[in-house]
Image (spheres, grey):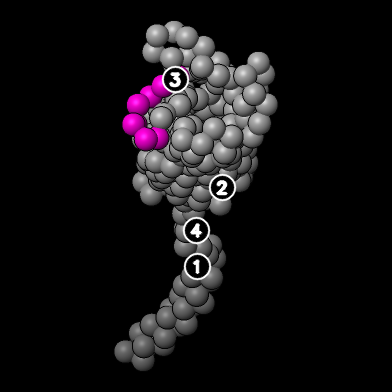
């Protein structure tokens, strides 16, 4: 029995260091690294927008009728429309191209300073923007600037104030100019984003001839025109992952 106990103790003493060595030899396995999520702004998108705009115009009567300043007015009103575009992202930089078309009701008037009793009226009932974008993305928040071409659909009229009768008009007119703007957009879902945008439209000065409803020449004016627009936007981006994980 004594020999058996001594043998058992010796076996345990020999096995203990071997087991400890086995435990020490096992490699340490670190826990998995946390997954980082990065929003991806690349891809085609389509969306809708709505907001408020204000057009500023100054009328100046020109030869052969009279050469004189007739005053200025603002045309304020609502606008609603849509946009379609494409963006591609390189690191934190985002580049894009976009086309936008809106219905509008920017209407205003003022009494002529040179022809008292007559009101000069203007209205913008639609506009379009064709712009490029350069932006900086902080994950799902995008700040961008934009610029390009702008086009407006306008109408100008002269109204007799005492009677309220329209005495002369230019008919519908399409005017081209330039646009600059900036926006802030937030990606709230993998393929959805919403934001706010400001645009200023520089529309070229243009000479207009006014005619009566009977087609008789009534006057001529050189009219300047620029527009400020603020809209809220929502976009849906097609295809591909809206977020990238690594």
Measured as percent of width and height from the top left, residue 36 is found at 49, 53
- Give the CA separation, mark 2 to mark 4: 30 Å
Q: Could you say which disc has been placed on residue 106 in the image?
A: none
Where does label 1 land, which residue?
Answer: 22
Q: Alpha-carbon distance for marks 4 and 3?
A: 74 Å
Residue appearing at x 39%, y 41% in the figure:
77
- State how far apart marks 1 and 2 are (Cα): 57 Å
Asked whether the residues under the numbered discs 2 and 4 touch, taking CB atoms below 8 Å apart as contact, a structural biologist would say no
Residue 226 visible here: no
Neighbours of disc 2 within 10 Å: few (<14), some (14-19), many (20+): some
* Residue 52 inside the magenta-drawn segment: no
Closer to the eye: label 1 or 3: 3
Which residue is located at x 58 percent, y 19 percent? 220
Which residue lies under the disc numbered 3? Answer: 168
Q: Secondary structure at mark 2?
A: strand
Residue placed farthest to the bottom in the image?
2
Label 1–label 4 contact, CB within 8 A: no
1 or 2: tag closer to the N-terminus? 1
Q: Residue at x 45, y 25 (%)?
A: 157
Residue assigned mark 4: 33
What is the secondary structure assignment of the residue under circle 1? helix
Q: Which callout, 2 or 3, points to the residue nearer the camera?
A: 3
Upstream in sequence: badge 2 or badge 3 = 2
Q: Nearer the viewer, residue 50 or 170?
A: 170
Spatial CA span between label 2 and label 3:
46 Å
Say left or right for 45 vs 94. Answer: left
Q: Which residue is mark 2?
A: 143
Q: Residues within 10 Å of mark 3 (few under 14, many from 20)?
A: many
Q: Earlier in the sequence, mark 2 or mark 4?
A: 4
Quarter of the image with the N terminus in it: bottom left
Contact between marks 2 and 3 (CB within 8 A): the answer is: no
């Amino acid at each position: 029995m004594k020999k058996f106990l001594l043998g058992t103790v010796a076996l345990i003493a020999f096995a203990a260091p071997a087991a400890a060595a086995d435990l020490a030899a096992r490699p340490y396995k670190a826990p998995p690294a946390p997954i980082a999520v990065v929003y991806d702004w690349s891809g085609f998108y389509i969306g809708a927008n709505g907001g408020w705009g204000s057009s500023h115009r100054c009328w100046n009567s020109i030869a052969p009728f009279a050469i004189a300043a007739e005053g200025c007015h603002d045309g304020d009103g609502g606008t609603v429309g849509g946009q379609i575009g494409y963006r591609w992202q390189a690191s934190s930089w985002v580049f894009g191209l976009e086309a936008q078309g809106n219905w509008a009701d920017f209407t205003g008037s003022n009494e002529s300073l040179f022809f008292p009793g007559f009101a000069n009226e203007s209205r913008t009932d639609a506009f379009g923007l064709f712009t490029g974008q350069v932006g900086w993305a902080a994950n799902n928040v995008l700040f961008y600037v934009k610029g390009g071409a702008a086009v407006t659909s306008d109408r100008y009229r002269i109204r007799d104030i005492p009677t309220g009768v329209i005495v002369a008009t230019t008919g519908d007119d399409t005017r081209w100019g330039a646009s600059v703007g900036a926006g802030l957009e937030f990606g709230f879902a993998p393929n959805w984003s919403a934001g706010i945008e400001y645009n200023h439209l520089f529309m070229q000065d243009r000479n207009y001839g006014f005619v009566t409803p009977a087609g008789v020449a009534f006057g001529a004016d050189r009219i300047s025109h620029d527009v400020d627009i603020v809209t809220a936007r929502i976009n849906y981006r097609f295809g591909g992952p809206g977020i990238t994980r690594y």
